[in-house]
Amino acid sequence: LLKGLIIEPKAQAQAWWREDETIAYVSTYLEPSTVYTVTLTTDILAANGDPLVEKASFTFRTRAFQPSFYLDVPSQVTAYNAYAKPTVLVKAVNVQTLDLALYTISPEDFMSLNTSDSWRRWQAFRPDPRQMVNRWSVKPDADLNAEARVLQALSYQDGTPLEPGLYFLNVSSPQARDAQRHLLVVTHLNVTVKSSATETLAWVTDLQSGQPAADVSLEVYGETTDLHAQATTDREGVA
């Protein structure tokens, strides 16, 4: 079947017979926004060995990639160094505008979005508009069908750095259907945790100096947001 199938510009293809060997299926990858010509020659043989009666060809143009984007972050929840300006990377294709909105979020909402069944709350969650701290509208710069990379530094509206705290970021586009969401923990501290079935040990250090952080209040919660323990670090940063 492939012997008599010509695709120009050239494209790798697979072909097989279906429907009692009366219909041929062709699978291939075609570049976007490209004019192709497909030619069927008389070298194509039916299942019984009969050749195609006459040569046939048709021409078409593939469409551009569907507008899309994604927030390229390590995970749904990520810690950011408060000593440096938190920055996020958004990758987009055929998107004219990206809209980013940053909100503060309460510890209660933050924990509810991180429980064992949080996916239900994650889909339904809507931040309080009064908690918005800044928003940006960005126009990605890239050719048609090429990936644009947008690095957006996050700050307050007056340009001052974000204070340590919990934040919710929503990224959307008029050209794309779904929004992307992200939880940020902006902090000066690093917490190393070791735990067993009955105990949890935490060591807290400063992200800039690396020195132990004393007198830091810590709380340990379970998957259902139940408070399991409270402690304060000692002069070695341990609790």
Image (tube, helix red, strand yellow):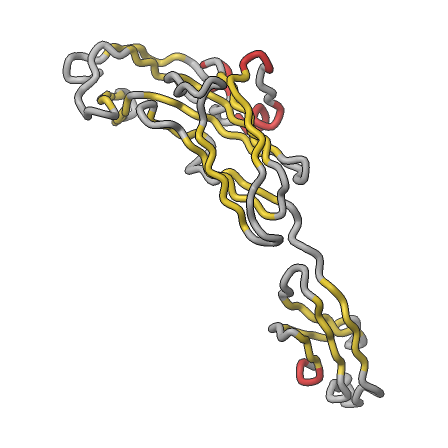
Report the side of 209 relative to 164 (left or right): left
Q: Residue at x 73, y 88 (%)?
A: 43
Which of the 4 quarters of the picture holds residue 162? Answer: top left
How far from the left and from the top, in percent, is residue 115? 48, 24
Q: Look at the image and tell me in which quarter the N terminus lies.
A: bottom right
Expressed as whole percent of the image width and height from the top left, the position of residue 44 reads: 74, 85
Q: Quadrant of the C terminus?
A: top left
Question: Is residue 136 something one can see in this rendering?
Answer: yes
Q: Is residue 215 above or below residue 160?
A: above
State left or right for residue 16 relative to residue 204. Answer: right
Q: Nearer the viewer, residue 124 or 62?
A: 62
Total marks drawn? 0
| In front of the other: 43 or 219 | 43
Residue drawn at (59%, 35%) of the image: 98
Outermost residue, left direction?
236
Tell me if 193 is positioned left or right of 58 in this view.
left
Position in image of residue 171 (x %, y %): 56, 32
Please identify the quarter of the rendering in which residue 195 is found. Answer: top left
Can residue 224 be seen?
A: no
- Residue under the point 50% across and 29% down: 182
Q: Position of residue 212 (x, y in %)?
A: 18, 20
